[in-house]
Image (tube, helix red, strand yellow):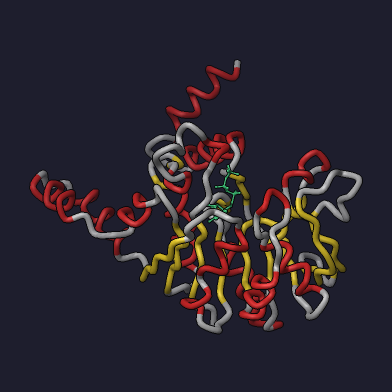
Amino acid sequence: MIRKAVFPVAGWGTRFLPATKASPKEMLPLVDKPLIQYTVEEAVASGIELAIFVTGRGKRAIEDHFDRSWELEYVLEKQNKREQLNEVRSISNLIEVVYIRQKMPLGLGHAVLRAKSVVDNEPFAVILGDDIIDSEKPCIKQLIEIYEKFEAPVIALKRVPDEEVSRYGIIKGRELDERLFLIEDMVEKPSLEEAPSNYAIVGRYILTPDVLEELEKVQPGKGGEIQLTDALRNLANKRKFYGVVFEGEHFDCGNKLGYLMATVHFALKRKDLKLDFLQYLRRVAL
Ligand code: UTP
């Protein structure tokens, strides 16, 4: 059973400056809902019971978002805004949360390792708020199903075009099934010549506690950061683990173009916005 999910949210978000100077990247909205809420809802829909946020300086807004807001609820109640009141309340009831500080953003691997004491020797999910996936079956649920079959770590994969391989971690793997790979190796942000495949790692993982032991041994790599990929590479030499080409539409919201595409995608799914927004898009596209 995968009950816990780690949400590393302590990064600088430099690609979104100046928006991220004083507020977290994870609180950027797609239409009217912050990125982090999309991913927490995905976790809840996948059966996750505890969200472990690894936070840092300037990330208080995330804590407030998942907490009760008595003043706001009071005002909404007075104004008889029932719908908004219910919505605001439901966010604070979504899931049990724990916050851990990453004192310095020393990399994704370092952030995940901070969660070790709360993970407490159980398999767990890691979900990156930058990666928004719209799918019928939640992406992390798709990974959990593979975990349940093999009881081994599972990572989410996406086939990317040549011009995008240098933006992702890329795997070398053996295709076992149409959407299933046995991972043999991985390279972080390779050039096209170095890339062993076109399968990119997307920010969803099911990890086992031995990954944390590997992380403890990892030395700082590219940019002085402790990379999760390095721990996973070392693990690939020791045990089997898997990659799943998930079903669903993925948006890399850590970069501006991906974020804008996601905004359009989710706006067009909204009944209250779709027609007017489409008309506007048609007008500007001409
Ligand atoms: P990114 O590298 O995409 O995020 O890390 P970033 O560093 O915040 O963004 P840029 O590159 O400067 O624009 C992926 C996720 O891992 C978290 C980030 O918050 C993000 O959600 N992260 C990254 C940490 O929690 N700690 C870190 O030390 C690094």
Relative horizontal placement of residue 44, taking residue 69 as reference (left or right): right
> Does 143 appear above or below 78?
below
Q: Residue at x 71, y 68 (%)?
A: 231
> Does 163 appear above or below 183?
above
**Where does the image place residue 154, in percent across and percent down from the top left?**
68, 71
The answer to whether residue 246 is visible is no
Q: Count the labels in the image.
A: 0
Residue 59 or residue 182, whichever sits in front: 59
Residue 83 or residue 271, whichever sits in front: 83
Q: Quadrant of the C terminus?
A: top right
> Does 238 appear above or below 133?
below
**Where does the image place residue 39, in percent across and percent down from the top left?**
49, 57
**Where does the image place residue 132, in percent across and percent down from the top left?**
55, 51
Task: Pick out the residue farthest to the right.
Answer: 193
**Where does the image place residue 282, in percent across and percent down from the top left?**
55, 22
Q: Residue at x 36, y 71 (%)?
A: 96
Residue 153 or residue 194, whichever sits in front: 194
